[in-house]
Image (tube, rainbow, N blue to C red):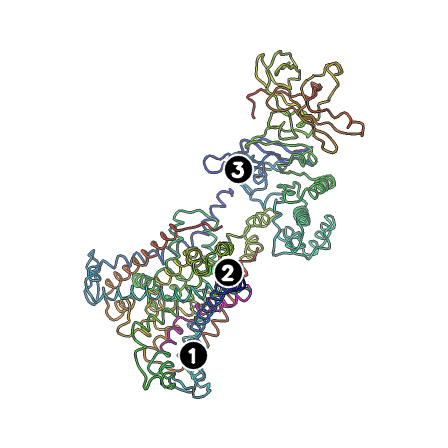
Amino acid sequence: MKLRTRRFIGSSAIVSPPLLWTLVFLFTPYLILFTYSFYLTKFPMFVPAFQFGNYVLIFTDPQYFQVLLRTVKIASIVSVSALLLAYPLTYFLVFKVQRPGLRAALYMAVIVPLWVSYLLRAYTWKTILGSEGVLNSFLVWSGILSEPTDIFLYNQFSMVLTLTYIYVPFMVMPLYTALEKIPRSVVEASKDLGVGPLRTFFKITLPLSMPGVIAGTTFTFCLTFGDFVAAFLVGGPNGFMIANIVQAQFGTALNWPLGAALSIVMLMIVLTVISLADRLERAGRLDLA
Amino acid sequence: MPDIIQLHSLTKTFGNDIVAVDKIDLTVGEGEFVTLLGPSGCGKTTTLRMIAGFEIPTRGRIYLSGDDVTELPPYQRHVNTVFQDYALFPHMNVSENVGYGLRVGGVPKGEIVTMVTDMLNMVGLIDKASHRPNQLSGGEKQRVALARALVRKPKVLLLDEPLSALDAKLRGAMQVELKHLHKKLGITFLYVTHDQTEAMVMSDRIVVMDRGRIAQLGTPTELYDHPATPYVANFLGSSNMIASRVVEVWPDGVRLRFGVCEIVCGANGQRFTEGERVTVSIRPEKVAVVDDRGSAPDGFNVIEGVVRDCLFHGNSYRIEVDIGQDKPFIVDVQLRTGADRAVMPEPGSAVAMTIDPANVNAFAAGADR
Amino acid sequence: MVALAQMDRVSLIAPRLRERAGDNLLWLIAAGTMAFLYLPILVLIVFSFNDNRVTTLPLRGFTLRWYQAVLDNADIQAAIVNSLYVATAATAITVVLGTTAAFALDRVDFPGKTAFRRLIFLPIALPGLVTGIAMLNLFRLMGLNLSLETVILGHATALTVIVVTQVFARLQRFNRRLEEASGDLGARPWQTFLFVTFPNIRSAVIGSALLSFTLSFDEIPVTFFLTGRDNTLPMYIYSTLRRGITPEINAVGTIIVVLSLGIIALSIYLLHNSQKED
């Protein structure tokens, strides 16, 4: 057999399975979803059509639009809070922990819980913040409160708290990579030139770590944006997010076209955020190598 | 001596415009040590890789022992390669590396052990048999790579700049070792290098390559004494290149003039015309310094000039002479006895130099480089 | 003269003190954040042994009865078995698909390569529920009933990217001359893969497989929409939580947390080592 033919057969054998799988199970489903978003709902079924009614509904009906805004708001707050907690921690790990073995161990200690049951970690906040939970019982037992309060749970505060908790490790990962890349000599040069540690941070370290900040914030935003588990556990009637509404459309509401349209809107928002972040990162890209 | 490798019009293009190898014709006889010599990018490594089977030729055929192997994958060709970075398997120890080819070839385990042990003894690495590659020095890795290739008793051994990663002293020692190995084993070596000394030391024949083509093919002496183009003249050793003009033409020679000087040399098979511009190539060590024009031997060329500088090189000295051209004329004089040192000329003094016409080469000015 | 010298010394100390104070503050925040990260896990573990139906302080006493309840609960056990089945099958698929895809991306130039690369990343870039819903639509259109098998397909699709990225990164650093040397020595392509290529990418494959397994075990958004009659463990916990908190959840949770921590630590160790292999 000719060498060239042999190589072609080999390449095709490697490329085909994953390509086919992606076409069938990724590309096609998204295409179907996109198509359904234009269909018309005739409860309890839906019929093929090409109309923008679902999309119009999403942006005009406060029932949907407000939740969309709330979701964006919560996702943004969570991203910022996670950043504010993760950055000092990561900075401390990278710059203040001298022994590489200890640093690696601490880094692992931060990252490992990330992969451990998301459901359980969110659930524990339910047990902590509830009126019969750990926090309340502690406050009552120590005398700060006379009786348990229910302000901790089932609202936007508990949502933000839980989601921040979940995503701090997510934020640490890209920050760690970005901060590690900064050559120490640059920071030392700044100090050598008489610039104090705080100004050095704001003028040198922070800008150089921007790619990590952008990556982490974007990632956190997108993941929080699509969350429905935390809302289900600790959100309550005021804390549910757009994902819960989508969930309902495919559940009891049986409004698949609307659900599809909502999904596409979510998809678009997330893709926009990602490409914005990409552009930001590329604009400020510095070659540290 | 039967031909063991034949390349017919072998061509390799990358993309649409990069011609790495351009219609190469070459035959290598069994048991020869042939070197492909040239700078990086001249196509020597690509040619070697096509013979090994790692690159598919765009056009042309490759024959090994008379069989057309152009379409065959590497594992069906009876050649073995020693790579520039040795390519030792990092997850196997030395024994396993050397025995790998035998193992995948289905040789029984007992035989593998014997053959590997013999080979390791031959390259002097038997006590490192269970070491991993990352525990070896550069020279040792090199020998493992050799052993691994040779244990399969190939008819042809392909070597892709195997010594380039070693330091100068080790390289010199390995060159001699490889030459002895070649004599001892009697198999064909096809060697690739950019180092002209290496090529001259080891090879039976050298193929000088330039931008995908063969510039000249011959024994080291042939190439050194009678380079066919300025490129070859400059690549092997160093040369004085002087622009001159043809004054007189004979059937087997020419008289040339540059400045006020006239010299004669052989035509080397080229056809010159009067008035033609040519480049003259004279090797620095072929020139002798004499007291004056009259002391030159009969029939020898004489060039006169003024000494610019005289540099002591330990076992020789190098004189830079101003002969009225933009570049100085270089003469290398070997110092054999202490007495020669007294003759070192003073800068500023006039000097006469003689060269045997047989040691002068002329090329048409438009010739390939 | 002396007064001046003293003043100089003070101006030297003050910024250094400030820097030390800044460092201490940083350490405080960092430690606080670490504590924040581990507090809920601690709560989970502590209360799984607490002799109380509700998670309130003060602690009542040590008991193993919640663990006993888990062992007696047939539903939990069925869910665990289902999850193991799904995770194993899904991981097997991701390893085969992911390794193949990594080779394809590393070695072959094919039409649609960039689109392919972007597509594989979508399931982790986008909200998981969108992928779940999209695949639900597909299955419904194909007339497939929802079952553990549809869950497996969903997990495989969403998690393949993990194997792809890790194996691809390893392949990029793999010296292809080794494969040429192997072929040169007479090894056929399958021999080269088995004896030379795979041993060098093995830890990347295994590490990412372990990661994929653990994530499959915990997967919710995609699973939610593709589950049929049989529940995976997260689905079981999810539906139990809908009815209210039961202390067995703490026990099950602790078991899962401890096991996952172990597997993940192993996976990261292997992946970290594969980054160092040469």
Where B252 sits versus A167, above or below?
Answer: above
Residue A259 falls in which quadrant of the image?
A: bottom left
Asked whether residue B257 is drawn in magenta, I would say no
Residue under circle 3?
A: B57
CA separation in Å, label 3 and label 2: 35 Å
User: What range is drawn magenta here?
Assistant: A99-126
**Marker disc for residue C205:** 2
CA separation in Å, label 1 and label 2: 35 Å
Circle 1: element type: helix
Give percent across and percent down for residue C67.
45, 83
Q: Is residue C123 visible?
A: no
The answer to whether mark 1 and mark 3 are in CB contact below 8 A is no
CA separation in Å, label 1 and label 3: 68 Å
Residue at far front of view: C1
Give percent across and percent down for residue A183.
50, 55
- Towards the viewer: A143 or B223: A143
- Towards the viewer: A190 or B228: A190
The answer to whether mark 1 and mark 2 are in CB contact below 8 A is no
Where A254 sits versus B304, above or below?
Answer: below
Circle 2: element type: helix
User: Which chain does the residue under circle 3 lie in?
Assistant: B
Report the mark closest to the observer, 3 or 2.
Answer: 2
Please rate how many residues cluster around mark 3, counting C-alpha atoms within 10 Å: few if below 14, some from 14 to 19, many from 20: many
Circle 3: element type: loop
Give percent across and percent down for residue C61.
45, 88
Residue under circle 1?
A: C43
- Towards the viewer: C110 or A179: A179
